[in-house]
Amino acid sequence: MQMVKKILILLFVAWIALLWIMPKQELYYKLEKILEEKDIKINEARIEEGVFSLTLHQADIYVKGIKLATVEKVNLFTLLFYSKVGFDNLVLDETLKSMAPTNIEEAMISHIVLVPKRLNLDMAGSFWNAKGKASLAQKHLRVDFNSTQGIEAFKPKLQQDDKGWYYEAS
């Protein structure tokens, strides 16, 4: 029993050490290069590296040279088996107001290794909340809105069922 305990402690310490010394900034720069191949660029004012996370401050997102969004803070967090990307004060370009909310106070995308082809989404605006799931295998997205306030601008894109308003795309 002592041997099993020592092995588990050793594995836990090795896992923490791996997360500690993981080159987070270099992985982010590699992600930037991959996105650049798809004409997506991220310009950030400052990068902070934490033990389990990487934080981008004042990030501007460009797609094909057009500024699409500004994010006050992007937090990339990983425990290797669970990862999440959090966005604080995401402001989309005004030309997109008929397609999506232009001011998203908080958004979070999370991924669990046990369900590798699904992403969970949580978003909140001034007067609305939304939860959703994206299936990467089926290329399907569903976002359920918990309230109807603040979503009037893009309500024509939404559908309604017994649970409330939702957005669905394949």
Image (cartoon, rainbow, N blue to C red):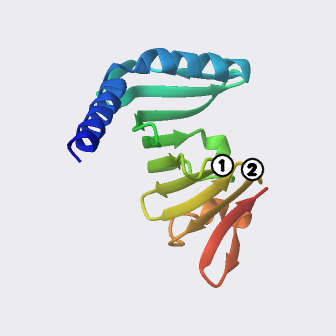
Of all residues, the one furthest to the bottom in this rendering is 162
In percent of width and height, residue 110 lies at 50, 48
Quarter of the image for the C terminus: give it. Answer: bottom right
Tell me which amino acid carries mark 1: Lys
In percent of width and height, residue 157 lies at 73, 62
Residue at 46% from the left image edge and 21% from the top image edge: 44
User: Residue 65 vs residue 17: left or right?
Assistant: right
Q: Nearer the viewer, residue 70 or 49?
A: 49
Q: Is 6 drawn above or below residue 39 in the view shown?
A: below
User: Residue 33 vs residue 140: left or right?
Assistant: left
The residue under label 2 is 137
Say which element carries label 1.
Answer: loop
Q: Is 141 drawn above or below residue 45 in the view shown?
A: below
Q: Nearer the viewer, residue 124 or 18?
A: 18
The CA distance from mark 1 to mark 2 is 6 Å
Residue at 55% from the left image edge and 51% from the top image edge: 114
Tell me which amino acid carries mark 2: Ala
Q: Nearer the viewer, residue 142 or 46?
A: 142
In contact (CB < 8 Å): disc 1 and disc 2? yes
In percent of width and height, residue 91 lies at 50, 41
Q: Quadrant of residue 153?
A: bottom right
Residue at 43% from the left image edge and 42% from the top image edge: 86
Q: Quadrant of residue 96?
A: top right
Q: Is 6 drawn above or below residue 155 in the view shown?
A: above
In percent of width and height, residue 158 lies at 70, 67
Say which element carries label 2.
Answer: loop
Residue at 45% from the left image edge and 57% from the top image edge: 124
User: Residue 155 vs residue 79: left or right?
Assistant: right
Q: Which label is found at residue 117?
A: 1
